């Protein structure tokens, strides 16, 4: 198998077969991220892609779901995605879905007709690192798009029948701004149809823009209890039937919930932690985080 640079897949794709479709990130300007800092975006050559498919066919001929690695393989043109999707079907006749990371920007150059065709070919499962639905927070994070863009592009996915997943990041708005971020994000996300929402909590790593801003006194990180309060507000305001997974290592206390059914129980669970664990203990956990990979 051909893997170059950082190979990263979300934990919910743990049972999917992975194949490298691209490496690096087309954007590289998010101020909280250093995952692909030293990599230029590169599409895997088709001969490498086919060699990897042939190897998968030998080892796992009955693979049902393939996850294409790379920061955002969906940045490829419609024609390139079509070629690769059809090639996967040539090699793996039992493959039912192909999933990958995507940015809101990657959807913009594809119309609904093209998206429907990609869905028919098996592309179904876009992990979208929205991080927020609040314009001020999106601008601070350097995402390069607005809440309006998120709404417009995801409604295209809804119309095409493509399943997608959101990421929300507590603490990203900075100290004192979590409530606003939570309310506006919940309002936007609730107007769309993410299959589930994964929640991370901002961790400042050296080399990132927000880390430098914090060092210079231009960004003030939210405390751990403020982040939990932000998550409570987000859950309370989110009017959507969905699964919520706040169980990555970036969260001091991992929780999962099926909303709205488990809304009040998970809010109470978070409140109990805030009432019984002191802020310094939580802060120490954050300081000791060296990586966001699962331990």
Image: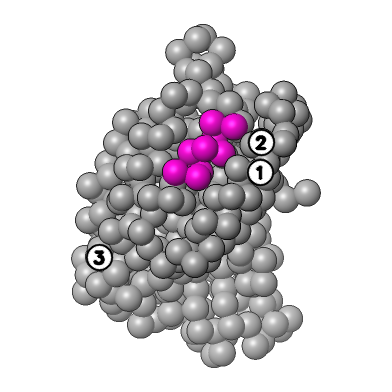
Which numbered mark, 3 or 1, is in the foreground of this view?
1
Q: Residues within 10 Å of mark 3 (few under 14, many from 20)?
A: some
Which quadrant holds the N terminus?
A: bottom right
Secondary structure found at label 1: helix
**Residue 254 drawn above or below residue 32:** below
Residue 200, percent from left and from top: 56, 45
Q: Residues within 10 Å of mark 1 (few under 14, many from 20)?
A: few
Residue 46, percent from left and from top: 50, 67
Please name the residue that numbered disc 1 is placed on: 272
Label 3 to label 2: alpha-carbon separation: 43 Å
Residue located at (54% from left, 90% from top): 93
Q: Can residue 23 be seen? A: no
- Majority SS type along the magenta span: helix
Q: Are marks 1 and 2 in contact (CB under 8 Å)?
A: yes
Left or right, residue 254 beside residue 119 = right
The front one of 259 and 75 is 259
Segment colored magenta: 225-233
Residue 161, percent from left and from top: 32, 76
Res 156 label: 3
- Residue 230 in the magenta stretch? The answer is yes
Label 1 to label 2: alpha-carbon separation: 5 Å
The front one of 6 and 170 is 170
Secondary structure found at label 3: helix
């Amino acid at each position: 198998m051909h893997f170059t640079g950082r190979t990263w897949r979300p934990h919910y794709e743990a049972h999917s077969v992975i194949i490298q479709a691209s490496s690096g990130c087309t954007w590289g300007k998010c101020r909280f991220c250093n995952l692909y800092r030293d990599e230029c975006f590169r599409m895997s050559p088709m001969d490498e892609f086919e060699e990897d498919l042939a190897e998968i066919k030998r080892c796992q001929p009955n693979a049902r779901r393939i996850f294409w690695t790379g920061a955002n393989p969906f940045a490829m043109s419609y024609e390139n995605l079509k070629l690769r999707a059809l090639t996967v079907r040539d090699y793996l006749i039992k493959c039912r879905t192909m999933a990958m990371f995507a940015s809101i920007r990657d959807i913009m150059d594809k119309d609904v007709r093209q998206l429907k065709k990609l869905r028919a070919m098996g592309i179904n499962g876009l992990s979208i690192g929205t991080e927020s639905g609040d314009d001020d927070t999106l601008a601070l994070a350097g995402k390069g798009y607005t809440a309006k863009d998120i709404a417009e592009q995801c409604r295209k996915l809804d119309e095409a029948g493509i399943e997608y997943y959101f990421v929300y990041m507590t603490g990203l708005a900075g100290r004192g701004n979590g409530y606003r971020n939570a309310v506006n994000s919940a309002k936007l996300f609730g107007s769309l149809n993410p299959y589930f929402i994964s929640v991370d909590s901002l961790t400042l790593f050296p080399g990132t823009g927000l880390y430098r801003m914090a060092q210079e006194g231009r960004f003030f990180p939210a405390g751990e209890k403020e982040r939990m309060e932000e998550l409570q507000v987000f859950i309370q305001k989110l009017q959507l039937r969905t699964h919520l997974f706040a169980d990555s290592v970036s969260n001091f206390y991992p929780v999962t919930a099926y909303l709205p059914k488990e809304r009040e129980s998970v809010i109470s669970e978070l409140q109990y932690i805030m009432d019984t664990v002191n802020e310094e203990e939580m802060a120490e956990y954050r300081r000791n985080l060296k990586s966001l990979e699962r331990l």
